[in-house]
Amino acid sequence: MLILWVLKKTTKNNMNFIIRKIQINLFLFGILMPNFIFFSCQKNTDNAQNTQEAGKNTENNTPQITLTGNIQPAQKGWIKVEKFADNNFTLLDSVELKGTTFSVKMNVSAESDFYKITLLNKRQIPLVLSQNDKNVKISVDANTPSLDYKITGSPDSEHYQKLNSILENINKEKQRLGEIYNKAQGNPAEMERIEEEFYDMQRKSIENVKKFIGESRPSIVSIVASNTLVPEEEFEFLKNLAEEVQKKYPNSPYTQKFTAQIAKMETQFKEKEHISIGKIAPDIALPTPDGGSLKISDLKGKYVILDFWASWCRPCRAENPKVVKLYQKYKDKGLEILGISLDKDAIAWKKAIADDNLTWKHISDLKFWQSEASQLYKVQSIPATFLLDKEGKIIAKDLRGKALEKKMEEIFK
């Protein structure tokens, strides 16, 4: 997740971060998957005829399936079939299309694996095939610029086509919101409205992906879909999925990679058990800007937001005006904020507090990422927040923007 941390620390503003979040999440597990997401028509200058013989599959003892295609109206060109392995595609076969139909016999693995077909050097179609798929059919509409297609006879391939459609729609909506957000610069009310719309879109997108996983599980495709989820928020869901695919595809390299990552995450989460929701927030005393000292436990009796930030963190500074507004609204109702800075320069720290009008309490040992507080709370990206109740118990984490505002409304009503 290092990529995500770096982007959080270097992004120019919050919206630029959040509109990229779904795309970034695709790589959270680091599983080697073929690049099938958002396939589109593309020009390919490979000469299929020249590679026809070199790519023939010679695994004659491996069970075969038959792949047939129908392209309307009649076309001329080459059809290439490739398999994904070792993070690359290998040519299995190629046939010349003369008319409207083609047929390819393919040697496939016992468990599902990834393949692709390149049509007429124009369109790539992802496939997920196993020995259970005896007769796979592809119907292609050559009247459409994108060579629209339909797959039957391969449930996993049909699921993968549906997943691509879901993710493509998410990406289009993300781009749309990003464009109108950029046009709204200088209009805080409109920018806030767009952010709220984005969070709502993201929530619905997660619901759609989880619904899709429920329909396609357990399968290799459901593993791909799971890459769009945030592990910390959906860990139990992902753990259950890993157990299911492990039973069905115990020898699949994708299953093995996925279950290994889930096991690694579980170990990491256990290391963070002391800061999980429901636990009493670990106590620590650090210097205040005036040279005194303050402990987290000194603030018991109030709802407290532990706000990890720094003067050099642009997303943090962009978030500060919203937090100021929230603090002014609820400080007399029992809200306290404790700013825990990851600064290393006392002058810059104090100047940022003054410039951003952060009138709440602050502490820092000025040790940058080696801060004792960040080590204790396992903070590896900022801004980061922990919300404590009056007894010092952690009741929420990483709430910002509208999510934090709604939580305050819920608490103070």
Image (spheres, rainbow, N blue to C red):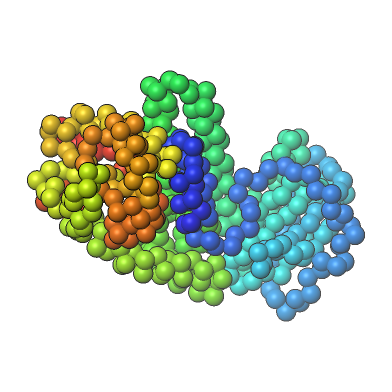
Q: Which of 389 and 157 is in front in this view?
A: 389
Q: Residue 401, percent across and down?
A: 34, 35
Q: Residue 169, percent across and down?
A: 54, 38
Write the residue at 60% across / 49% down. Answer: 37
User: Dividing the picture into quarters, in which one does residue 15 lie?
Assistant: top left
Q: Which residue lies furthest to the bottom in this view?
A: 61
Query: On screen, 237 above or below 389?
Result: below
Write the residue at 27% across / 64% down. Answer: 273
Q: Residue 108, percent across and down?
A: 67, 69
User: Dividing the picture into quarters, in which one does residue 112 lie?
Assistant: bottom right
Q: Which of 333 and 19 is in front in this view?
A: 333
Total residue callouts: 0
Q: Nearer the viewer, residue 4 or 75?
A: 4
Q: Residue 44, percent across and down?
A: 80, 48
Query: On screen, 176 above or below 77?
Result: above
Write the residue at 55% across / 71% down. Answer: 252
Please indicate, yes or no, whether residue 379 appears anywhere in the rendered image.
no
Write the residue at 74% across / 35% down. Answer: 145
| Relative horizontal placement of residue 260, taking residue 322 as reference (left or right) | right
Query: On screen, 156 above or below 73?
Result: below
Q: Quadrant of the C terminus?
A: top left
Please indicate, yes or no, whether residue 408 appears anywhere in the rendered image.
yes
Q: Which of 260 and 169 is in front in this view?
A: 260
